[in-house]
Amino acid sequence: MFPLEDQAEHTDILKGAYLKILLKTGKEPITPFSFADEIGIEEDEFYAHYNTFKALEKDIWLDIFNHVRSAIDADTEFDTYSGREKVLSFFYTLVEVYKLNRSLVMFRMAELPRQNIDPWFLEKFKEEFTTMFTSILGDAFESDEVVSRPMVSDRYKDALWIQLLYISRVWVNDDSDEYQITDAGIEKSVNLAFELMRKGPVDLLIDFAKFAYQNKAY
């Protein structure tokens, strides 16, 4: 039986036991009953917190996001950063948190097909990521760091999500000293993303074409 502790402590026990079995055997426990029996609790105590093992693992990945967010929140300078700097800070912090959860990240990301941009285990992580990055991009729009484009700018956050998956795969396969390849991948990909999102030659051409058409200046 669980001792009379905080609910958070109960879920931490379940998460730790689940991870131990998953990473030791390469698969989730066979049934909630066998899992509960192995860790010395009643089956209904598992169901008091989770309906499935997938729901439990989604919470583990949400914890990874929350650790990143907590580290960022502790940075008193973060709110003064540009949008590009905020995104860089997020990704650099993410790979530091990955290092603390290396076996799980390697296990899931190494088997993830490249065409899968919505992994089931990242469902809750993605919800929080989308909320956070919508806010970051909102500030970037206001400061004119990035430009609003019809039918395109609403997809910026989706492009940054795909970038997260790219960086995660780079990190999983990075055998360079001190993850130098990952660091370079983060910097180059984020810089490119913000170059593509800011006002550039294409926007100037569109503006000129609109002006020429509206004013018959040709």
Image (tube, rainbow, N blue to C red):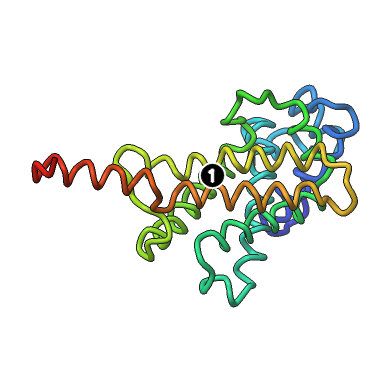
- Position in image of residue 208 (x %, y %): 24, 46
Q: Give the residue drawn at x 57%, y 63%.
A: 85
Q: Is residue 1 something that shows in the picture?
A: no
- Position in image of residue 164 (x %, y %): 62, 43
Choose top left, top right, bottom left or bottom right for residue 43: top right
Q: Give the residue drawn at x 58%, y 76%.
A: 77
Q: In which quadrant will I find the C terminus?
A: top left
Compared across the picture, whether 108 is left or right of 199 comes to: right
- Which of the two residues, 19 or 123, is positioned nearer the viewer here? 123
In the image as oriented, which residue stretches furthest toward the front? 218
> Callout 1: helix, strand or loop?
helix
- Which of the two residues, 20 or 2, is positioned nearer the viewer here? 20
**In the depicted structure, whether residue 39 falls above or below residue 93:** above
Q: In which quadrant will I find the N terminus?
A: top right
Number of numbered discs:
1
Compared across the picture, whether 126 is left or right of 54 comes to: left
Q: Give the residue drawn at x 76%, y 26%.
A: 111
Choose top left, top right, bottom left or bottom right for residue 69: bottom right
**In the depicted structure, whether residue 23 falls above or below residue 208:** above
Compared across the picture, whether 171 is left or right of 155 comes to: right
- Position in image of residue 97 (x %, y %): 75, 54
Q: Give the residue drawn at x 65%, y 35%.
A: 47
Q: Is residue 156 something that shows in the picture?
A: yes
Which residue is identified by label 1? 160
Amino acid at the residue labelled 1: Leu
- Which of the two residues, 134 or 63, is positioned nearer the viewer here? 134
- Which of the two residues, 87 or 68, is positioned nearer the viewer here? 87
Q: How crowded is mark 1: few (under 14 residues within 10 Å), some or many (20 or more)?
A: some
Choose top left, top right, bottom left or bottom right for residue 90: bottom right
